[in-house]
Image: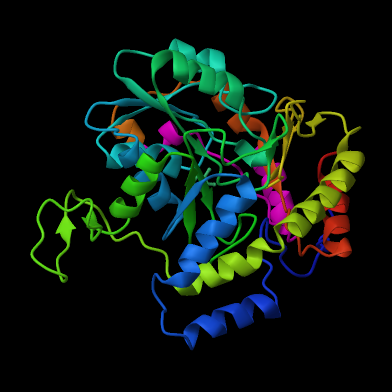
Amino acid sequence: MSSQPIRDTFLPYGRQKIDDKDIQAVIDVLTSDYVTTGPEVVHFEQAVADYVGAKYAVAFSNGTAALHGACFAAGIGKGDEVITSPLTFVASANCVLYQQGVPIFADIDPQTYNIDPVQIEKHITKRTTAIIPVDFTGQPAELEQICEIARRHNLVVIEDAAHALGAVYRGERVGSISDMTMFSFHPVKHITSGEGGIITTNSEDYYQKLIQFRSHGITRSREQLENDHGPWYYEMQFLGFNYRMSDIQAALGRSQLNKLDEFISKRKQIIELYNQSFRDITGVQIPVQSSNTVSSWHLYILRIDSTKFDRREIFNAFLDNNIGVNVHYIPVYFQPYYQQLGYEKGLCPVAEEVYQTIITLPLFPSMAEKDVQDVITAVHHILN
Ligand SMILES: *Cc1c(COP(=O)(O)O)cnc(C)c1O
């Protein structure tokens, strides 16, 4: 390889896009009466609920806290088994551990990389209480089959849609299909609030529990109080957390939401160029889309033939050319903490095989045409 890198400056795999309107929205909050949870959080929750077509939304300090809240609201407790995907960020399983539950990893589909409903069914026991499907890379999981399995076994579906704001499953936007759906507003996701997350749901019962869980388990609502000492009185009725989102975050999130559709269509334009350019490379598999879904394209992942390429060498070659590639993800149970809990390698052979062969390319709405071309040039240069 030539010593001259394809780019002089580093291109990250993901990046937020913040404009003057976003900045003004935050400034407006900073000079208002509220900086912590106030009217902006309520507006943001309403805007997200409207966008996804859900009755309720509860914002949290981050997506992981939101998942924890959903596990609490679903009633997951000590020893309860919750089935999730191994090919995800650790938060999808950690939220079960926070509630003393037991994450159970069901293997994935080798084409879409989403959790395989047949594998879910195989792992159901008397202790199973919930399923946490992950809409991997922005492509919704097989939600119809998953919700049907859940109905038959009386399980709660908590969808980890951290990648999938704006994605569509069988004509419906993700966010009102599962019992509860989580979105993240971390800066690499579709829209950002700095840190932030949200649960959307159509259930008033879950909504009430989430609101209370987010703020120490405290309520001031007259109808819910067991006693009433006077107008100052509130009650902590269970052990909750301080997982509140601030108005500063919510104002940024709401301003960003106005641009979501534009962000997604920019992502799709880049995907088209990538797919066209990489389709015919031998030993390289471009992403496979299920006909039931319209992905919102959080990540673009190439699968490379491990008999032809050495992934470590390939990965380093991209970095040497200042192309910020990544690997999504290391199977969760490979993590030392999970190994110490007794999870063994070999649990999910498909996920483990996929992990060996994937590489994530840069994809974000503020990529310039030249950035996209640099990635394409690098792929052809490195994967030939
Ligand atoms: C980002 C992410 C989360 C956690 O969201 P945070 O807002 O970073 O806490 C959970 N699951 C998946 C799949 C994610 O990508």
Q: Residue at x 48, y 40 (%)?
A: 202
Q: Position of residue 241 (x, y in %)?
A: 27, 56
- Nearest the viewer among 133 and 353 is 133
Residue toward you, 196 or 52: 52
| Residue 266 falls inside the magenta stretch | no
Q: Position of residue 65 (x, y in %)?
A: 38, 52
Q: Residue furthest bottom?
A: 31
- Is 185 above or below relative to 356? below
Instruction: Name the image quarter holding residue 261.
Output: bottom right
Residue 196, image x, y percentages = 48, 60
In the image, 338: left or right of 288? left
Question: Residue 286: percent from the left, percent from the top?
Answer: 79, 34
Q: Is residue 324 left or right of residue 61?
A: right
Whether 317 is among the magenta residues is: yes
- Residue drawn at 47 percent across, 64 percent down: 42
Name which quarter of the figure residue 71 lies in.
top left
